[in-house]
Amino acid sequence: MEERSLNFIEQIVENDLAEGKNDGRIQTRFPPEPNGYLHIGHVKAVCMDFGIAERYNGVCNLRFDDTNPVKEDAEYVDSIERDIRWLGFKWGHIYYASDYFQQLYDLAIRFIREGKAYVDEQTAEQIAEQKGTPTEAGVASPYRDRPVEENLRLFQAMQNGEIEEGKMVLRAKIDMANPNMHFRDPIMYRIITSHPHHRTGRKWNVYPMYDFAHGQSDYFEGVTHSICTLEFVVHRPLYDYFIDQFSGANFAGLSPYGPDYRPRQFEFNRLNITYTVMSKRKMLQLVKEGLVAGWDDPRMPTVCGLRRRGYTASAIREFIDKIGYTKVEGMIDVGLLEHTIRENLKETAPRVCAIFDPVKLVITNYEKKEGEEIEVQNIDGHEELGTRVMPFARELYIERGDFLEEADNKFFRLSPGGREVRLKGAYIIQATGCEKDAEGNITTVYATYDPESKSGTEGGNRKTKATINWVECRSCIDAEARLYDRLFACENPSAEEADFRELLNPESLVVKQIKVEASLRKEMHNPEVVDGIEQCAHYQFLKQGYFVVDLDTTADKLVFNRTASLKDNWQK
Ligand code: ATP
Ligand code: MG
């Protein structure tokens, strides 16, 4: 890959290094909430966070932002780790925000003692109503000036499980008139008693909110560059505010990096892709309602879905490299993603014959009873990629559409009347006629071949206007082809009035029974599993597209997923 220019965050990092900030230490983190599977939007953040650490000899840690037990699960933790490894990245440590629950709780107590936080007993609706607007100050809660001792007692009661979920929250006492709405007494803690936490069980009844947990976690760990997406720009002043309260001279001893150390937040544009929804909440709905087969349905923009679809880790990373990082939100054409996987597989995927709508072809002058074996290159013109053997005999299957009983002079494939057509990698044939059933459907096509015209022999250089695909009748294998297309029928499902579930493309999956060449018999087994990931081979089915062996394949059944068609509509 050609060397690209630095993105704006790399430039910031280089400036920081030049200025000797943090003694040249670079530390990032990738902070997923374990409430769903990683999607390709997350990969953009993964590539940034891990990429910066790799490039500048730093470290990137994986931190699970597990502050909401209602939605989180260990299943998600495992899948996130697996997907990051598959993408080819290595973390330094694995941390959990829940590891800091005690420290955060202690900080909150300290905050209350300093008169900087209070327990509010209003409902979420009342609190929202009092927030005001960016140009209009909010209204103070009637509980804002509670005495410190009462706040302490109530917060402890919240944690002790004495207060019902939703009845009280802990709020920072900052400024109800601040033009930045996030400063209008943000909620620091809420009560959750309905669900145990996947790691801490029933130990905690209060859980910190994102704004209170994230910056502090960065600070505890020594993160230097806390990189996230643009929607957090408005949170940044609050991120800095909380850290200033607890770091340096205000809270000496919490960081091994000295009183001047501060993590700093930087933001880039999130990834949005046309014909796609990129939100864990919506994806979970698709999964739960059975609108897709699971998180790894090949139509899903999840890492596991893309992998099952046949996307390689290198293609996904190349795509992220191509789109780059900016400070403006935008929409990326899904065509670019499809283009990237085509370009990627073009170089490596062996070509094979698969017949999607078969009709029998009988070569009437072919006399060799046992047939013969034809050696063909895996990728034409690439000797180094090896060859394979295709059994050839008197009876073959070809595509029904490759034969016309009566054709005009614009049709170059098989038709009676003397036109020569090459069977891919094999002989030149001419159609002589066909047989039909009572309804007039063609059941057999008849042809003669030229024994001197075999590809790779002297006579094999003779040119024909068309080449057609074939498989040999006795040796070919029945297989299932799952033809996947875009999951949504409209370009920006999130911007439509209608519920996104009504915008699904009804043809996003078409299943076909096909016949594939004998060499694919080697794929008939349960795919080998390495690090929890099925290893599935990629192929190009000539004239059809790129396909990957699906993990539903067994010793009795061969299943392929279409990764991408061959036609590329992408234009630079
Ligand atoms: P979603 O909105 O899909 O539920 P999220 O932002 O809630 O995603 P997190 O698990 O909190 O998911 O995200 C982990 C990291 O991935 C965050 O730093 C977040 O900024 C980043 N991220 C999430 N979605 C995208 C995206 N579409 N493009 C780039 N980065 C993203
Ligand atoms: Mg989030």
Image: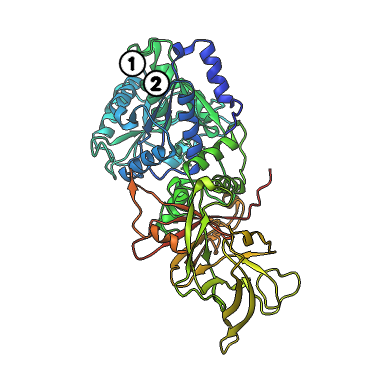
Percent x, y of residue 23: 44, 11
Query: Which residue is label 1 attached to?
Result: 254
Disc on res. 219: 2
**Precedes in sequence: disc 2 or disc 1:** 2
For residue 195, what is the image quadrant? top left
Percent x, y of residue 432: 64, 80
Q: Is residue 318 visible?
A: yes
Query: Who is closer to the viewer here, 24 or 252?
Result: 24
Q: Is residue 166 visible?
A: no
For residue 136, what is the image quadrant? top right
Question: Residue at image x 49%, y 43%?
Answer: 40
Question: Residue at image x 42%, y 22%?
Answer: 223
In the image, is residue 50 above or below residue 33?
above
Percent x, y of residue 48: 50, 31
Measured in 3D between alpha carbons, the distance from the residue under mark 2 to the one under mark 1, in whole angstroms, is 8 Å
* Left or right: residue 219 compared with residue 195: right
